[in-house]
Image (cartoon, grey):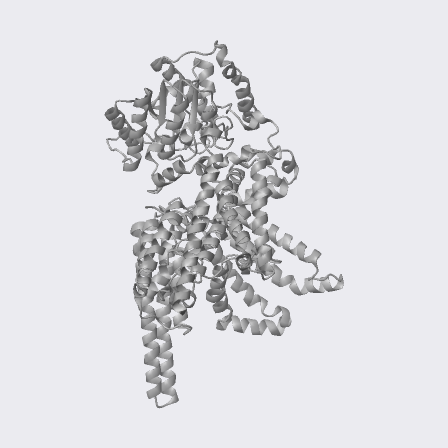
Amino acid sequence: MKITSYISVAYLAIFLPAALLLYTIIPKKARPFVLLIASYVFFWFISEFLIAYLIFTTLCVYLLALWLDKLKAKRKTLLEGAESKEEKKRIKTKNTRAQRWIIVFGIVINVAILAVLKYSPFFVSSLNTALRFAGVNEALAPPKFMAPIGISFYTLQAVSYIHDVYKEKIGADKNLGRVALFMSFFPIIMEGPICRYSDTAHALWSGERLHYTNACFGAQRIAFGALKKMVIADRLNVFVTTAFKDYEAFDYDGGLVLLGAILYTVELYMEFSGTIDVVIGSGEMFGVKIPENFRQPFFSKSISEFWQRWHITLGTWFRDYIFYPVTMSKGMKKLTKKCRKKLGRDYGPLPASIIAFFCVWACNGLWHGAGWQFIMFGMYHFVLISLGALILPLSNKCLAKCHIDRNKFPYKAFTILRTALLVCIGEMMFNSRGAKDSINLMRVLFTKFTFKSWFDGSVLTLGLDPHDIIILCIAIAIVLAVGIMKERGISPREWVAQRPIFVRWPIYMALVLFTVVFGAYGAGYIPIDPIYANF
Amino acid sequence: MKKLKFEKQTIKKAVASVVFVLLAIGMIVLLSLFFNEERLETQTLKDVKPYSVLAEPDNTLDAVIFGDSEAFAAFSPVEMYNKYGFTSFVCASASQYITLTESFVRETLEHQKPKVIFLETNAIFRKMNSTKPLESAIDAQFPVFPYHNLWKNFDPLNINENENDYCFRDDLKGFKYTAIVNKSDNKDYMKKTKEKQKIPATNTSYVYSIYEYCQEKGVELVFVSAPSTVHWNYAKHNTIAALAKKLGVKFIDLNLEDDIGINWNTDTCDRGDHVNYYGATKVSAFFGKYVHNKFDLPDHRNDSAYSDWNQLKAKYDVVTGKKANKT
């Protein structure tokens, strides 16, 4: 059996029910092992022999974390027995150095595996281009490696585990099974979210029995995710694919390219957040609370806020393991101190922050893919966020002078629309075929812009007919309504659960049947592959 | 006492879950009464081209070509009709699995009595998930899944202004027009070899099933491979040639027919994966001649019963000419 997506018959009708059934019928003590075996079987289905990389990374971080723990214990004992300050200092220095070597080794080896498998062809072809520019005609053959699906996700989890042990946020786990399950839990292995050991490891290993409420809520979340993916994302796939593939051949204007960018952004959100709904719903069924990855991102009023609401677990990972370590490094602290004296309190911390932002966004771009378009995507957000931070004091002054209230609806609406538009332009680069294509799309967008194609019927030639447009509007309105409820602090599921049965059940039934009838599946439709599984 | 209460609650919840699931299945069965093949015969789907073969009047097709995107890109029934007068249809969808092909063959032969059907061979090699047969079985039991898109025919808002345009018989007869040119550099893809490329075991059983059904219906089955530098090679050719020999069916590999005159610089839309309109014109001319010579199909061009086919040329020229001008 091959599982290519969480929203598939193989997963939803066979794998998940089988895992749930096995989990329910066996004794509590054996349940974690069922999850572990199910996770490894799942990984085998998606990556076959490449499972060896996952096993290696798991063993590597498990052993290194234990070694770190041992060193910490040894330090404590030695310090207790030390007689002088000098001796204590010497012990601390030696022990800290040893721990640093271990953490550096742990991070480097795992990141190196990711870099070699995923990025070496890109690095070699970039090197070849550079050599060609330098007049060297010798070209290196780009290596070809098979990378397991989900490597970008589990590698980040591995790094976070060993780093948190090093920083003593958590203790090293002596239970190899628990570490292995944390690394491989089948609902999260393909598209995240990127979990921390402290979030999920113990809940996963607890063998909690199945609860009716968890099962119901989990199933509802899965049904909602399926609606997002099958009704909206898969329906938009034809339009988006045609718009991005044929825009040059059919000489599309900037309006059509913009529409393609907007609809791609909607498609990406519905596909990714829909899959995450299925992931979180699956976890919920087993009684495991998987962290949320989205919080109504299109209500953001700035790009930095957007990234706190979109792919949240990736953003917090970069914040904790790149942004903070860079800004808190000795060099950056010195720089901030100097800049504070010269630039004042408002602008003083900015140079160090901008350097850290650069590191974060270069890594973010590269994490999304091995290609210059992804680096451009990262740099685009770096520029926007840095500019936002730079002009914030100035824009505050301007708004105060013009008597514009940030909290009033018109200004809020303006900032939300502005942010959404900037995000769509970023996603347009993201979906391009390369840096050259990315620049070309920008050229068409800004030099040939007109809304003519929106109204002359051209839109209807790209694979969406008026029926599709109506269904898209209804489905997006449903998702929007759920988003508005959440923004107002109302849990839609709790709200529905409190209604009487003759209201509650028709709502659940309608959710399922809406997807069955209006889903874009079957002959004539090609569902999008899980977009984030490739990262 | 407390334990008993808990058990009562558990039983209540279990019963509620079972009732809900049964109700959901009941609703799907109910929907299947509205969304099924019978409704498709007269009002078919615009998006799902292969289904429109069922909108053709019964027993009017002389040949039907089944397959995936390689088939709908390469064969133009209108071109072949205009040159040789036999009627045909391309029943194919993108990335089509052989399970779906098999069900299309069965559905089509319920309504048509073609002399020959052609099976484009690319889909035979498409690896299927092992759940595909299960999906096919579910589709057979609950027609709402394969035919759910019929909702587009319920038109309370009168969106389908031109009814004929929507509840339609496909004017291109399953052919998909594209005039995009994106050349292929892989021109030497048919290097002779003795190797064979393996067909997944499940797929073979579906090919046998198609073959047996054709035998039962008295229709000749022929394998045909459309030109593709991306998806075709000599190892695949060898496998299909051996399979054809085993089943005693004809096999024509258009990748080996130099007389077609495919120019991979101009006749492909996606670097050799599929031929474009210019390639399809050449393939259809060659293939039409082959079918005409080998199978002795009737010429309907002067037959008043086929007047709708005679009117297709004008429409075809509009579609192909208009879009060709754009590029």
Question: Outermost residue toward the bottom?
Answer: A83
Question: Outermost residue toward the right?
Answer: A402
Instruction: Please tell me whether residue A508 is drawn above or below residue B148 in the rendered image.
Output: below
The answer, for residue A443, to whether it is visible in the render is no
Image coordinates of residue A4 in percent, x first then y, are: 39, 47
Instruction: Please tell me whether residue B29 is drawn above or below residue B122 in the rendered image.
Output: below
**Res B216 → quadrant:** top left
Image coordinates of residue A452 in percent, x first then y, are: 66, 36
**Res A341 → quadrant:** bottom right
Q: For the point 57% across and 66% down, which residue is it?
A: A351
Question: Outermost residue toward the front?
Answer: B1
Count of picture labels: 0
Image coordinates of residue B203 in percent, x first then y, are: 31, 35
**Res B160 → quadrant:** top right
From the viewer's side, name the closer residue of A221 and B141: B141
From the viewer's side, name the closer residue of B203 and A315: B203
Image coordinates of residue A130 in percent, x first then y, are: 44, 49
Instruction: State left or right for residue A494 relative to residue B114.
Output: right
Q: For the point 52% across and 70% down, which residue is it?
A: A332
From the viewer's side, name the closer residue of A46 and A70: A46
From the viewer's side, name the closer residue of B304 and A402: B304
Instruction: Please tell me whether residue B9 is drawn above or below residue B49 in the rendered image.
Output: below
The answer, for residue B317, to whether it is visible in the render is yes
Instruction: State left or right for residue A487 relative to residue A135.
Output: right
